[in-house]
Amino acid sequence: MKTMQNETRLEKTRATLNADEAFVFVYGTLLKGQSNYNRFLAPANPVMRGEIDGFEMYDLGAFPGIVRGDGKVKGEVYRVTKKQLEEIDRLEGEGILYKKESVKVEGNFFEDRTVTAYVYIYNQSVTNCPQIPYDAQPYNNQYVWYVAYGSNLLMERLACYIEGGYCERNGRDYPPCEDDTLPTESIAIQLFGNMYFANYNQGSWENSAVSFFDPDGIGIAEGRAYLIKESQLEHIHRLEGKGSNWYPDTLELGELDGIRAVTFTNKNVKPSAPMCELSAAYISTIMDGLQEMGNDAEFAFYYIRECTARIASTRWTREDAVYEEKERLEFGRNKKKS
């Protein structure tokens, strides 16, 4: 039965290309199941799995790149239209970031054939980029955006979780992550929902109340998304505290550039703590993080004060949140004028 199924599949792939079609060999985020597949290749016709000789693959952060070398690279071949190929050209930054060339692709054991296909070759330096060996292929995007909204807004603080060691901010030692690579990228974002403070006098940050996020609460929360490995995400979650009184819940926030974004919180909303229950160390860490993201000190302090004034159990509408954001921006402009 398996042999008949393979022969049927092979017969379907032996059809010749039309004038406005081409084969393309993909090896990274365009692979089936990866971040760019649905947008660019889901409607395309899969041809076969295969590999190309004379290339090496490198991890460039959130995506891989290949350059000419002594190895082999695994991937998939798709039949695409001229329009689809042009869209992929734009995705890959063809001619600048990547260079498109024709290569011969050898099929695997069950798809014993050779096709000529376009492939995108990285056009920049791979110095200091880790190589992805043949045995670790095909490429699997293991990255995730971890979105912080509390003390981890500050890179220095998050680095203590990843690299391990003593954190001067709260006087604690942390074990390092097995992969101690710092985030390859971070971006400032805003979350519709309420950042509030709770858990006063529970032994953290000089008994300070600490940050929680309620996606159904009033307001817009300032966040910072860090591009990290999925293995690091579990390590961070464990150090943040997965117990029922801390951050047991992983909240899926959607996607940024095709990569899932998540944060940690407690879905059981807690009583909101006033500003007097925040320690100076905790306030200064959040303020420094907000300023590192490009905000000034007045904005950072006003934001913290605003979060302590919110009622965590109150629910909001999008119109409420947009109005509040306009009010906050107006406050910042008035402060700068004065």
Image (cartoon, rainbow, N blue to C red):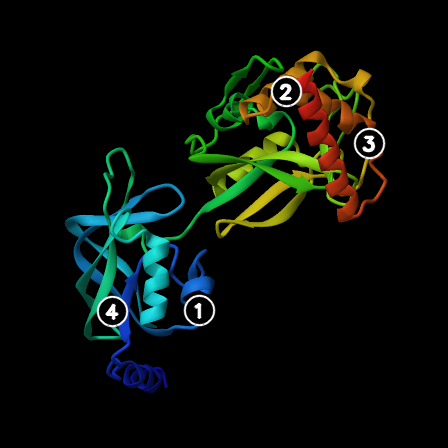
**CA gap, disc 3 and disc 4:** 60 Å
Q: Which residue is mark 3?
A: 310
Give residue 154's position: percent from left, percent from top: 56, 24
Q: Residue at x 66, y 41 (%)?
A: 191
Q: Which residue is mark 1?
A: 42
As drawn, is 129 to the left or to the right of 148?
A: left
Secondary structure under the numbered disc 4 in the rendered image: loop
Q: Earlier in the sequence, mark 2 or mark 3?
A: 2
Residue 316: which quarter of the image? top right
Q: Earlier in the sequence, mark 4 or mark 1?
A: 1
Amino acid on which the number 4 mark rests in the picture: Asn
Q: Quadrant of the C terminus?
A: top right
Q: Nearer the viewer, mark 3 or mark 4?
A: 3
Does the CB distance between marks 3 and 1 fall below 8 Å? no
- Classed neighbour count for the residue bearing mark 1: other residues with Cα under 10 Å, few (<14), some (14–19), many (≥20): some
Secondary structure under the numbered disc 2 in the rendered image: helix
Q: Residue at x 28, y 66 (%)?
A: 24
